[in-house]
Amino acid sequence: MKTSQSSINLYSILVLLYFLSSCQTAVEVEKPSKPNVVIIFADDMGYGDLGVYGATDWKTPNLDQLAADGVRFTQFYVPHAVCSASRAALLTGTYANRLEIFGALDHTAKHGLNPKETTIAEMLKSDGYATGMVGKWHLGHLPEFLPTKQGFDQYYGLPYSNDMWPHHPQSKDYYPPLPLYQNETVIDTLEEQSQLTTNYTEEALKFIEKSKDKPFFLYFAHSMPHVPLFVSDKFKGKSEQGLYGDVMMEIDWSVGEVRKKLVELGLAENTIIIFTSDNGPWLSYGGHAGLTAGLREGKGTSWDGGIREPGIFVWPDHFPAGKVIDQTAMTIDILPTLAEITGADLPALKIDGRSILPMLEGKEMESTPYYAYYNKNELQAVIYGHWKLVFPHSYRSIPEGTIMRNDGIPVKYQMLDLESAQLFDLSVDPNETTDLSNSNPEMLETLSQFAADARADLGDALTKSEGPGLRKHGKVAETN
Protein backbone atom coordinates (compact mmCIF):
# COMPACT_ATOMS: atom_id res chain seq x y z
CA MET A 1 0.00 0.00 0.00
CA LYS A 2 1.34 3.39 -0.92
CA THR A 3 1.74 5.85 2.00
CA SER A 4 0.39 9.32 1.32
CA GLN A 5 2.57 12.39 1.65
CA SER A 6 0.18 13.83 4.24
CA SER A 7 0.59 10.72 6.44
CA ILE A 8 4.39 11.06 6.29
CA ASN A 9 4.15 14.73 7.25
CA LEU A 10 1.84 13.91 10.18
CA TYR A 11 4.20 11.21 11.40
CA SER A 12 7.17 13.58 11.15
CA ILE A 13 5.33 16.22 13.16
CA LEU A 14 4.46 13.70 15.88
CA VAL A 15 8.09 12.53 16.10
CA LEU A 16 9.28 16.12 16.30
CA LEU A 17 6.77 16.95 19.04
CA TYR A 18 7.85 13.88 21.03
CA PHE A 19 11.49 14.86 20.65
CA LEU A 20 10.85 18.40 21.80
CA SER A 21 8.81 17.15 24.75
CA SER A 22 11.62 14.79 25.75
CA CYS A 23 14.16 17.60 25.56
CA GLN A 24 11.98 19.82 27.74
CA THR A 25 11.57 17.03 30.29
CA ALA A 26 15.31 16.46 30.36
CA VAL A 27 15.91 20.15 30.96
CA GLU A 28 13.39 20.15 33.78
CA VAL A 29 15.03 17.15 35.42
CA GLU A 30 18.45 18.74 35.21
CA LYS A 31 17.28 22.08 36.60
CA PRO A 32 18.88 22.50 40.03
CA SER A 33 16.53 22.53 42.99
CA LYS A 34 16.18 25.54 45.22
CA PRO A 35 18.96 25.73 47.81
CA ASN A 36 18.43 24.68 51.38
CA VAL A 37 18.97 27.46 53.91
CA VAL A 38 20.50 27.13 57.38
CA ILE A 39 20.80 30.20 59.61
CA ILE A 40 22.82 29.62 62.78
CA PHE A 41 22.29 32.46 65.24
CA ALA A 42 24.41 32.67 68.40
CA ASP A 43 23.40 34.67 71.48
CA ASP A 44 25.51 37.48 73.01
CA MET A 45 28.57 36.44 71.01
CA GLY A 46 31.32 39.00 70.59
CA TYR A 47 32.91 40.15 67.34
CA GLY A 48 36.21 38.62 68.49
CA ASP A 49 34.85 35.25 69.62
CA LEU A 50 35.94 33.16 66.61
CA GLY A 51 39.49 32.20 65.74
CA VAL A 52 39.15 33.77 62.34
CA TYR A 53 38.09 37.01 64.06
CA GLY A 54 40.96 36.96 66.56
CA ALA A 55 40.09 34.59 69.43
CA THR A 56 43.15 32.81 70.82
CA ASP A 57 42.13 31.33 74.19
CA TRP A 58 39.74 28.82 72.63
CA LYS A 59 39.58 27.06 69.30
CA THR A 60 36.80 27.28 66.69
CA PRO A 61 38.09 25.10 63.82
CA ASN A 62 34.68 24.40 62.30
CA LEU A 63 33.64 28.04 62.21
CA ASP A 64 37.07 29.04 60.90
CA GLN A 65 36.66 26.47 58.13
CA LEU A 66 33.17 27.77 57.44
CA ALA A 67 34.67 31.21 56.88
CA ALA A 68 37.37 29.74 54.65
CA ASP A 69 34.71 28.02 52.54
CA GLY A 70 32.65 31.16 52.01
CA VAL A 71 32.65 34.91 52.47
CA ARG A 72 33.44 36.66 55.73
CA PHE A 73 32.36 40.19 56.61
CA THR A 74 34.44 42.61 58.64
CA GLN A 75 31.54 45.08 58.99
CA PHE A 76 28.45 42.96 59.52
CA TYR A 77 25.87 44.49 61.85
CA VAL A 78 22.67 43.93 63.75
CA PRO A 79 20.28 46.93 63.98
CA HIS A 80 19.55 46.51 67.69
CA ALA A 81 21.90 45.39 70.46
CA VAL A 82 19.43 43.30 72.44
CA CYS A 83 17.72 39.93 72.11
CA SER A 84 14.08 40.22 70.98
CA ALA A 85 14.56 43.31 68.83
CA SER A 86 17.51 41.79 66.98
CA ARG A 87 15.62 38.54 66.31
CA ALA A 88 12.56 40.37 65.01
CA ALA A 89 14.78 42.31 62.61
CA LEU A 90 16.55 39.16 61.36
CA LEU A 91 13.38 37.20 60.69
CA THR A 92 11.41 40.02 59.05
CA GLY A 93 14.09 42.08 57.28
CA THR A 94 12.68 45.07 59.15
CA TYR A 95 13.85 47.39 61.92
CA ALA A 96 12.28 46.07 65.12
CA ASN A 97 11.17 49.51 66.27
CA ARG A 98 9.02 49.67 63.11
CA LEU A 99 7.34 46.50 64.43
CA GLU A 100 7.03 47.78 68.03
CA ILE A 101 9.32 45.03 69.34
CA PHE A 102 11.78 46.34 71.94
CA GLY A 103 14.26 44.96 74.43
CA ALA A 104 13.92 41.40 75.69
CA LEU A 105 10.43 39.94 76.16
CA ASP A 106 9.95 37.81 79.26
CA HIS A 107 7.27 35.53 80.73
CA THR A 108 5.03 38.49 81.64
CA ALA A 109 4.83 39.89 78.09
CA LYS A 110 1.30 39.97 76.64
CA HIS A 111 2.57 40.76 73.15
CA GLY A 112 4.91 39.38 70.51
CA LEU A 113 5.80 39.55 66.84
CA ASN A 114 2.61 40.43 65.00
CA PRO A 115 1.43 37.42 62.97
CA LYS A 116 0.63 39.88 60.17
CA GLU A 117 4.38 40.32 59.63
CA THR A 118 6.05 37.93 57.18
CA THR A 119 9.02 35.97 58.51
CA ILE A 120 11.71 34.25 56.47
CA ALA A 121 9.99 30.99 57.39
CA GLU A 122 6.63 32.14 56.00
CA MET A 123 8.25 33.53 52.87
CA LEU A 124 10.08 30.28 52.13
CA LYS A 125 7.24 28.00 53.22
CA SER A 126 4.99 29.65 50.64
CA ASP A 127 7.70 28.80 48.11
CA GLY A 128 7.60 25.09 48.91
CA TYR A 129 10.14 24.85 51.73
CA ALA A 130 9.97 22.69 54.82
CA THR A 131 10.65 24.98 57.77
CA GLY A 132 12.03 24.15 61.19
CA MET A 133 13.34 26.06 64.17
CA VAL A 134 15.57 24.91 66.99
CA GLY A 135 16.61 27.03 69.97
CA LYS A 136 15.78 30.41 71.44
CA TRP A 137 12.66 32.11 70.06
CA HIS A 138 12.15 35.27 72.17
CA LEU A 139 9.42 36.88 70.05
CA GLY A 140 6.47 36.08 72.28
CA HIS A 141 5.87 33.02 74.48
CA LEU A 142 2.08 32.99 74.29
CA PRO A 143 0.41 30.54 71.85
CA GLU A 144 -0.48 33.29 69.36
CA PHE A 145 3.18 34.16 68.81
CA LEU A 146 5.07 30.86 68.94
CA PRO A 147 7.21 29.78 65.94
CA THR A 148 4.55 27.38 64.66
CA LYS A 149 2.28 30.42 64.23
CA GLN A 150 5.01 32.34 62.40
CA GLY A 151 5.77 29.99 59.51
CA PHE A 152 7.69 27.13 61.10
CA ASP A 153 6.45 23.57 60.58
CA GLN A 154 8.11 22.45 63.78
CA TYR A 155 9.88 23.92 66.79
CA TYR A 156 12.08 22.72 69.64
CA GLY A 157 13.54 25.14 72.13
CA LEU A 158 13.14 27.86 74.75
CA PRO A 159 10.55 30.64 74.36
CA TYR A 160 12.89 33.29 75.78
CA SER A 161 16.40 33.74 77.24
CA ASN A 162 17.96 30.95 79.25
CA ASP A 163 18.56 33.31 82.21
CA MET A 164 14.83 33.86 82.66
CA TRP A 165 14.51 31.14 85.28
CA PRO A 166 14.43 30.79 89.10
CA HIS A 167 18.24 30.52 89.29
CA HIS A 168 18.85 34.04 88.00
CA PRO A 169 21.64 35.59 90.11
CA GLN A 170 19.71 38.80 90.76
CA SER A 171 16.02 37.92 90.27
CA LYS A 172 15.52 34.52 91.87
CA ASP A 173 11.89 35.11 92.91
CA TYR A 174 10.76 36.76 89.66
CA TYR A 175 10.95 34.02 87.05
CA PRO A 176 8.95 30.76 86.86
CA PRO A 177 10.51 27.42 85.82
CA LEU A 178 12.14 27.60 82.38
CA PRO A 179 9.93 25.78 79.84
CA LEU A 180 11.23 23.67 76.97
CA TYR A 181 8.84 23.50 74.02
CA GLN A 182 8.17 20.93 71.34
CA ASN A 183 5.99 22.77 68.85
CA GLU A 184 3.29 24.33 71.08
CA THR A 185 3.64 21.96 74.04
CA VAL A 186 5.83 22.35 77.11
CA ILE A 187 7.66 19.02 77.33
CA ASP A 188 9.99 19.83 80.23
CA THR A 189 11.18 22.52 82.62
CA LEU A 190 14.93 22.91 82.95
CA GLU A 191 16.76 22.71 86.25
CA GLU A 192 20.15 22.81 84.55
CA GLN A 193 21.33 23.38 80.99
CA SER A 194 24.50 21.35 80.42
CA GLN A 195 22.85 19.30 77.64
CA LEU A 196 21.08 22.21 75.96
CA THR A 197 23.53 22.73 73.09
CA THR A 198 23.80 18.98 72.53
CA ASN A 199 20.02 18.54 72.52
CA TYR A 200 19.54 21.49 70.17
CA THR A 201 22.09 19.98 67.81
CA GLU A 202 20.43 16.58 67.83
CA GLU A 203 17.07 18.16 67.01
CA ALA A 204 18.61 20.17 64.18
CA LEU A 205 20.12 17.02 62.67
CA LYS A 206 16.77 15.23 62.92
CA PHE A 207 15.07 18.06 61.03
CA ILE A 208 17.68 17.98 58.27
CA GLU A 209 17.33 14.21 57.93
CA LYS A 210 13.54 14.43 57.87
CA SER A 211 13.52 17.23 55.28
CA LYS A 212 16.26 15.95 52.97
CA ASP A 213 13.93 15.25 50.02
CA LYS A 214 12.68 18.82 49.58
CA PRO A 215 14.14 22.30 50.03
CA PHE A 216 14.28 23.21 53.71
CA PHE A 217 14.92 26.20 55.93
CA LEU A 218 16.47 25.61 59.36
CA TYR A 219 16.70 28.47 61.84
CA PHE A 220 19.09 27.26 64.55
CA ALA A 221 19.20 29.86 67.34
CA HIS A 222 21.62 28.86 70.09
CA SER A 223 20.89 29.93 73.67
CA MET A 224 24.63 30.14 74.32
CA PRO A 225 26.92 31.93 74.97
CA HIS A 226 24.25 33.99 76.78
CA VAL A 227 24.55 33.63 80.55
CA PRO A 228 24.09 31.44 82.50
CA LEU A 229 26.83 29.46 80.78
CA PHE A 230 26.52 25.69 80.65
CA VAL A 231 28.57 23.13 78.77
CA SER A 232 28.43 19.36 78.42
CA ASP A 233 31.08 17.11 79.97
CA LYS A 234 32.66 16.52 76.56
CA PHE A 235 33.78 20.16 76.39
CA LYS A 236 34.25 21.01 80.06
CA GLY A 237 37.79 22.28 80.64
CA LYS A 238 38.74 22.15 76.96
CA SER A 239 39.68 25.80 76.51
CA GLU A 240 42.47 27.85 78.03
CA GLN A 241 40.04 30.62 78.98
CA GLY A 242 37.59 28.66 81.12
CA LEU A 243 33.86 28.15 80.93
CA TYR A 244 33.13 30.77 78.25
CA GLY A 245 35.76 29.28 75.98
CA ASP A 246 34.40 25.80 76.61
CA VAL A 247 30.93 27.01 75.56
CA MET A 248 32.29 28.56 72.37
CA MET A 249 34.07 25.30 71.52
CA GLU A 250 30.81 23.37 71.95
CA ILE A 251 28.97 25.79 69.66
CA ASP A 252 31.78 25.29 67.15
CA TRP A 253 31.32 21.51 67.47
CA SER A 254 27.61 21.94 66.84
CA VAL A 255 28.29 23.83 63.60
CA GLY A 256 30.59 21.01 62.55
CA GLU A 257 27.88 18.42 63.22
CA VAL A 258 25.42 20.30 61.02
CA ARG A 259 27.94 20.46 58.19
CA LYS A 260 28.79 16.76 58.54
CA LYS A 261 25.11 15.85 58.29
CA LEU A 262 24.74 17.92 55.13
CA VAL A 263 27.75 16.18 53.58
CA GLU A 264 26.48 12.75 54.65
CA LEU A 265 23.14 13.39 52.91
CA GLY A 266 24.74 14.87 49.79
CA LEU A 267 23.18 18.27 50.49
CA ALA A 268 26.23 20.40 51.26
CA GLU A 269 26.75 21.73 47.73
CA ASN A 270 23.21 23.10 47.53
CA THR A 271 22.86 24.51 51.02
CA ILE A 272 23.36 28.13 52.07
CA ILE A 273 24.77 28.46 55.60
CA ILE A 274 24.69 31.80 57.40
CA PHE A 275 26.34 32.31 60.78
CA THR A 276 26.12 35.39 63.00
CA SER A 277 24.82 36.52 66.42
CA ASP A 278 22.08 38.72 67.84
CA ASN A 279 24.31 41.31 69.57
CA GLY A 280 27.65 41.80 71.25
CA PRO A 281 28.86 40.45 74.59
CA TRP A 282 27.24 41.23 77.94
CA LEU A 283 30.36 42.86 79.34
CA SER A 284 29.18 43.19 82.96
CA TYR A 285 29.55 39.41 83.31
CA GLY A 286 33.35 39.64 83.04
CA GLY A 287 34.88 36.23 82.38
CA HIS A 288 31.46 34.90 81.39
CA ALA A 289 31.23 37.38 78.49
CA GLY A 290 32.79 37.34 75.05
CA LEU A 291 35.30 39.51 73.23
CA THR A 292 34.73 42.67 71.20
CA ALA A 293 38.21 42.54 69.60
CA GLY A 294 38.76 46.06 70.90
CA LEU A 295 35.47 47.52 69.66
CA ARG A 296 33.85 50.08 71.96
CA GLU A 297 31.37 48.92 74.63
CA GLY A 298 29.08 45.88 74.23
CA LYS A 299 25.55 44.53 74.34
CA GLY A 300 22.83 47.10 74.93
CA THR A 301 24.72 49.95 73.25
CA SER A 302 24.89 51.33 69.72
CA TRP A 303 28.68 51.48 69.80
CA ASP A 304 30.27 48.88 67.55
CA GLY A 305 30.99 46.45 70.38
CA GLY A 306 27.23 46.05 70.76
CA ILE A 307 26.19 45.82 67.12
CA ARG A 308 29.09 44.54 64.97
CA GLU A 309 29.13 40.75 64.65
CA PRO A 310 30.90 37.99 62.76
CA GLY A 311 29.07 37.42 59.49
CA ILE A 312 29.79 34.27 57.49
CA PHE A 313 27.92 33.19 54.33
CA VAL A 314 28.61 29.91 52.53
CA TRP A 315 27.12 28.55 49.30
CA PRO A 316 29.56 26.38 47.32
CA ASP A 317 30.14 27.43 43.69
CA HIS A 318 28.11 30.62 44.25
CA PHE A 319 29.85 32.62 46.99
CA PRO A 320 33.65 32.81 46.46
CA ALA A 321 35.53 30.78 49.07
CA GLY A 322 37.88 32.69 51.33
CA LYS A 323 36.65 36.13 50.30
CA VAL A 324 36.75 38.87 52.93
CA ILE A 325 34.16 41.63 52.47
CA ASP A 326 34.83 45.04 54.01
CA GLN A 327 31.55 46.55 52.84
CA THR A 328 28.73 47.10 55.31
CA ALA A 329 25.75 44.76 55.59
CA MET A 330 23.16 43.92 58.23
CA THR A 331 20.91 41.07 59.33
CA ILE A 332 17.88 42.85 57.84
CA ASP A 333 19.45 42.16 54.42
CA ILE A 334 19.19 38.38 54.81
CA LEU A 335 15.46 38.07 54.05
CA PRO A 336 15.52 40.03 50.75
CA THR A 337 18.73 38.26 49.74
CA LEU A 338 17.10 34.86 50.23
CA ALA A 339 14.05 36.07 48.33
CA GLU A 340 16.22 36.96 45.33
CA ILE A 341 18.08 33.64 45.47
CA THR A 342 14.98 31.44 45.79
CA GLY A 343 12.54 33.50 43.75
CA ALA A 344 10.18 33.77 46.72
CA ASP A 345 7.87 36.77 46.92
CA LEU A 346 8.92 39.59 49.21
CA PRO A 347 6.58 40.50 52.09
CA ALA A 348 3.62 42.71 51.25
CA LEU A 349 4.41 45.12 54.10
CA LYS A 350 7.41 47.43 53.88
CA ILE A 351 10.78 46.00 54.89
CA ASP A 352 14.04 47.83 55.49
CA GLY A 353 16.68 45.40 54.19
CA ARG A 354 17.94 45.03 50.64
CA SER A 355 19.43 42.11 48.75
CA ILE A 356 23.20 41.81 49.08
CA LEU A 357 23.45 38.92 46.62
CA PRO A 358 25.82 40.78 44.25
CA MET A 359 28.12 41.50 47.19
CA LEU A 360 28.09 37.83 48.23
CA GLU A 361 28.89 36.80 44.67
CA GLY A 362 31.90 39.10 44.57
CA LYS A 363 30.26 41.74 42.40
CA GLU A 364 29.74 45.47 42.85
CA MET A 365 26.57 46.75 44.49
CA GLU A 366 24.69 49.47 42.64
CA SER A 367 24.71 51.79 45.64
CA THR A 368 25.83 52.09 49.25
CA PRO A 369 22.92 52.17 51.72
CA TYR A 370 22.74 53.80 55.10
CA TYR A 371 21.75 51.82 58.18
CA ALA A 372 20.00 53.16 61.27
CA TYR A 373 20.62 52.03 64.86
CA TYR A 374 17.73 52.36 67.27
CA ASN A 375 17.68 51.60 70.97
CA LYS A 376 13.95 51.25 71.56
CA ASN A 377 12.63 54.41 69.85
CA GLU A 378 15.88 56.37 70.09
CA LEU A 379 17.87 56.88 66.90
CA GLN A 380 21.36 56.64 68.36
CA ALA A 381 23.52 56.19 65.25
CA VAL A 382 23.61 55.84 61.47
CA ILE A 383 26.26 54.15 59.33
CA TYR A 384 27.08 54.84 55.70
CA GLY A 385 29.88 52.66 54.33
CA HIS A 386 32.78 53.03 56.78
CA TRP A 387 31.41 56.27 58.26
CA LYS A 388 29.37 56.30 61.47
CA LEU A 389 27.55 59.21 63.09
CA VAL A 390 26.59 58.76 66.74
CA PHE A 391 24.02 61.12 68.26
CA PRO A 392 23.86 62.47 71.81
CA HIS A 393 22.38 59.86 74.12
CA SER A 394 22.92 58.03 77.41
CA TYR A 395 24.55 54.62 77.35
CA ARG A 396 25.79 52.07 79.83
CA SER A 397 29.47 51.36 80.47
CA ILE A 398 31.67 49.48 82.93
CA PRO A 399 33.23 51.99 85.37
CA GLU A 400 36.96 52.36 84.90
CA GLY A 401 38.92 50.32 87.42
CA THR A 402 36.12 47.82 88.07
CA ILE A 403 37.36 44.40 89.14
CA MET A 404 35.56 41.96 86.86
CA ARG A 405 34.17 38.68 88.13
CA ASN A 406 34.36 35.16 86.73
CA ASP A 407 31.52 33.46 88.60
CA GLY A 408 28.41 34.39 86.62
CA ILE A 409 27.59 37.40 88.82
CA PRO A 410 27.52 40.73 86.93
CA VAL A 411 29.14 43.96 88.06
CA LYS A 412 27.16 47.20 87.96
CA TYR A 413 27.10 49.49 84.95
CA GLN A 414 27.30 53.26 85.10
CA MET A 415 25.37 55.52 82.73
CA LEU A 416 27.39 57.94 80.61
CA ASP A 417 26.15 60.81 78.46
CA LEU A 418 27.40 61.57 74.97
CA GLU A 419 26.96 65.33 74.89
CA SER A 420 27.31 66.03 71.15
CA ALA A 421 27.15 64.14 67.86
CA GLN A 422 30.39 62.45 66.85
CA LEU A 423 31.55 61.25 63.44
CA PHE A 424 33.91 58.28 63.06
CA ASP A 425 35.81 56.74 60.15
CA LEU A 426 35.58 53.06 61.05
CA SER A 427 38.11 52.06 58.39
CA VAL A 428 40.92 53.66 60.42
CA ASP A 429 39.22 54.02 63.80
CA PRO A 430 37.09 50.89 64.46
CA ASN A 431 37.19 51.59 68.20
CA GLU A 432 35.39 54.93 67.75
CA THR A 433 37.89 57.14 69.57
CA THR A 434 38.40 60.16 67.28
CA ASP A 435 35.57 62.55 66.36
CA LEU A 436 35.99 63.84 62.79
CA SER A 437 32.92 66.09 62.68
CA ASN A 438 34.90 69.33 62.31
CA SER A 439 37.26 68.02 59.63
CA ASN A 440 34.60 66.31 57.51
CA PRO A 441 31.60 68.65 57.30
CA GLU A 442 30.33 67.17 54.01
CA MET A 443 30.19 63.64 55.40
CA LEU A 444 28.61 64.97 58.57
CA GLU A 445 25.90 66.62 56.47
CA THR A 446 25.37 63.44 54.42
CA LEU A 447 24.85 61.24 57.47
CA SER A 448 22.73 63.91 59.16
CA GLN A 449 20.42 63.84 56.15
CA PHE A 450 20.21 60.05 56.38
CA ALA A 451 19.20 60.46 60.02
CA ALA A 452 16.54 62.99 59.04
CA ASP A 453 15.15 60.47 56.54
CA ALA A 454 15.01 57.79 59.24
CA ARG A 455 13.24 60.13 61.67
CA ALA A 456 10.69 61.11 59.03
CA ASP A 457 9.75 57.43 58.69
CA LEU A 458 10.40 55.81 62.07
CA GLY A 459 10.48 58.76 64.45
CA ASP A 460 13.05 59.39 67.17
CA ALA A 461 12.42 59.78 70.90
CA LEU A 462 15.67 61.72 71.29
CA THR A 463 14.40 64.51 69.03
CA LYS A 464 10.73 63.96 69.89
CA SER A 465 9.99 63.05 66.26
CA GLU A 466 6.87 61.06 65.38
CA GLY A 467 7.16 58.17 62.92
CA PRO A 468 4.30 57.54 60.49
CA GLY A 469 5.90 54.28 59.33
CA LEU A 470 5.50 52.41 62.60
CA ARG A 471 3.34 49.30 62.88
CA LYS A 472 1.82 47.53 65.88
CA HIS A 473 3.15 44.46 67.61
CA GLY A 474 0.87 41.50 68.10
CA LYS A 475 -1.14 41.70 71.30
CA VAL A 476 -3.30 39.20 73.13
CA ALA A 477 -6.94 40.25 73.08
CA GLU A 478 -8.20 41.43 76.47
CA THR A 479 -10.89 39.20 77.99
CA ASN A 480 -13.31 39.96 80.79
Image: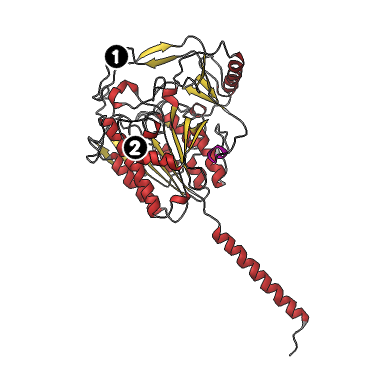
Residue to which mark 2 is pinned? 60
Magenta stretch: includes residue 368: no
Q: Residue at x 50, y 34 (%)?
A: 325
Q: Quadrant of residue 80?
A: top left
The amino acid sitting under disc 1 is Thr
- Please tell me how crowded label 2 is: few (under 14), some (14-19), or many (20+) other residues with Cα within 10 Å: many
The amino acid sitting under disc 2 is Thr
CA separation in Å, label 1 and label 2: 30 Å
Rendered location of residue 217, percent (x, y): 45, 46
Residue to which mark 1 is pinned? 402
The answer to whether residue 457 shows anywhere in this view is: yes
Q: Which mark is residue 67?
A: none
* Total tally of numbered discs in the picture: 2
Q: Say which label, 1 or 2, has the lower sequence index.
A: 2
Left or right of 114 in this view: 290: left
Q: Which residues are magenta?
A: 357-361
In this view, the residue farthest toward the top is: 419
Magenta stretch, main secondary structure class: helix
* Front-most of residues 397 and 143: 397
Left or right of 2 in this view: 39: left
Rendered location of residue 455, percent (x, y): 57, 20
Q: Quadrant of residue 87?
A: top left
* Front-most of residues 455 and 68: 68
Looking at the rendered structure, the secondary structure element under dot 1 is loop
* Front-most of residues 286 and 204: 286
- Please tell me how crowded label 1 is: few (under 14), some (14-19), or many (20+) other residues with Cα within 10 Å: few
Left or right of 239 in this view: 369: right
Rendered location of residue 188, percent (x, y): 27, 41
Give the number of the mark in front: 1 or 2: 2
Looking at the rendered structure, the secondary structure element under dot 2 is loop
Left or right of 322 in this view: 141: left
Look at the image and tell me in which quarter the N terminus lies.
Answer: bottom right
